[in-house]
């Protein structure tokens, strides 16, 4: 197999690995959402406790009572008629208690109204949660099998490509194949195996792995691994795009379209798998 055919083969491998991971990541996010939606179906409104600041009311009682006392003390002192002074004092005390009781009743009624308003808001939120969960659950259960089928399909196609024996079993994975593609594409080597004057992709990979110039762990890819970095960005961008399209479906279940963005993406991946399998059947990777 010449260099171009090797690069075409590796490109198909990397693309399929990328699509497989995209489908897997999206499927896992759907599993989490499915669990949340099922929990949301049981959403009910709970009437909140009556929030009355009894401590504040008591403090205001003592403060206002003290102020009232300070106001009427001079009247008692200057009053020449003790009976008149006592009458004035009694009137002030009665008025104070009438005013304060009215104030407390007003605060209680205000708290009850706030309680009812919050309860109504909770009921509306519970209703919208059930509606939204119902819609999203229906969409998830419609699209999730498609993603699983795409994942399985990509994995099966990959295994059939790997069994061609073009790449050594040790390197049949996303990271090594992506690095081989990068080595060949940048002209650092012209084949997978070593030849006179050419280290070969296998040796380059082992050397860079040994000296930690590259990483074979997807959770700590180095910046100079351009092909892998780009594929990971593509995976993340595609997952976010598919996920956001699912979240944009409105609460009305009648608005769920069968031809969603997820369905369209799955169809495109299926077509790509079909084209790759066509190449394999036609011995493209051997005799291209």
Image (cartoon, rainbow, N blue to C red):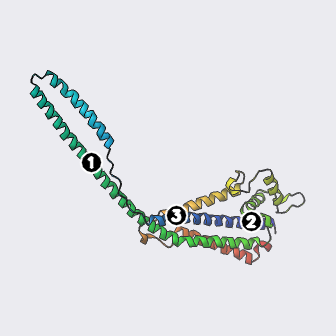
Q: Which mark is residue 212?
A: none
Disc 1, SS:
helix
For label 2, the residue is 10
Q: Under tag 3, what secondary structure? A: helix
Q: Image check: 191 left or right of 92?
A: right
Q: CA distance from mark 1 to mark 2?
A: 74 Å
Image location of residue 74, percent across then percent down: 18, 23
Q: Which residue is mark 1?
A: 108
Q: Nearer the viewer, mark 3 or mark 1?
A: 1
Q: Which badge, 3 or 1, is on the more N-terminal residue?
A: 3
Q: Residue 73, image x and y in percent?
A: 19, 26
Q: Quadrant of residue 30?
A: bottom right
Q: Residues within 10 Å of mark 1 (few under 14, many from 20)?
A: some
Coordinates of residue 105 in the picture (x, y in percent): 23, 46
Q: Who comes first in sequence, dot 2 or dot 3?
A: 2
**Which tag is nearer the camera, tag 2 or tag 3?**
3
Residue named by callout 3: 33
Q: In the displayed structure, would residue 277 be above or below residue 251?
A: below
In the structure shown, which secondary structural element does the residue marked by tag 2 occupy? helix
Say whether residue 38 is visible. Answer: yes
Q: Nearer the viewer, residue 149 or 276?
A: 149
Q: Is residue 263 visible?
A: no
Nearer the observer, 106 or 130: 106
Q: Residue 20: image x %, image y %? A: 65, 67
């Amino acid at each position: 197999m010449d260099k171009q055919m090797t690069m075409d083969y590796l490109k198909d491998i990397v693309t399929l690995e990328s699509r497989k991971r995209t489908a897997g990541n999206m499927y896992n996010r759907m599993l989490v959402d499915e669990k949340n939606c099922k929990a949301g179906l049981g959403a009910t409104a709970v009437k909140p406790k009556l929030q009355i600041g009894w401590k504040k009311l008591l403090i205001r009682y003592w403060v206002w009572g003290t102020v009232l006392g300070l106001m009427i003390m001079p009247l008692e002192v200057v009053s020449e008629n003790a009976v008149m002074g006592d009458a004035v004092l009694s009137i002030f005390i009665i008025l104070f208690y009438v005013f304060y009781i009215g104030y407390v009743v007003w605060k209680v009624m205000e708290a009850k109204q706030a309680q009812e308003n919050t309860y109504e808001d909770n009921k509306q939120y519970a209703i919208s949660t059930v509606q939204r969960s119902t819609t999203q659950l229906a969409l998830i259960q419609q699209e999730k099998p498609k993603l699983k089928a795409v994942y399985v399909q990509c994995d099966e196609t990959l295994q059939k490509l790997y069994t061609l024996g073009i790449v050594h079993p040790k390197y049949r994975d996303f990271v090594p194949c992506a690095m081989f593609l990068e080595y060949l594409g940048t002209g650092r080597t012209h084949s997978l195996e070593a030849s006179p004057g050419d280290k070969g992709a296998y040796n380059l990979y082992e050397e860079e792995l040994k000296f930690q110039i590259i990483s074979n762990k997807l959770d700590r890819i180095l910046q100079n691994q351009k092909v892998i970095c780009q594929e990971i960005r593509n995976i993340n961008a595609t997952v976010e795009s598919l996920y956001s399209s699912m979240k944009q479906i409105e609460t009305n279940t009648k608005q769920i379209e069968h031809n969603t963005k997820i369905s369209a993406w799955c169809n495109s991946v299926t077509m790509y798998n079909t084209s790759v399998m066509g190449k394999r059947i036609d011995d493209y990777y051997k005799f291209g």
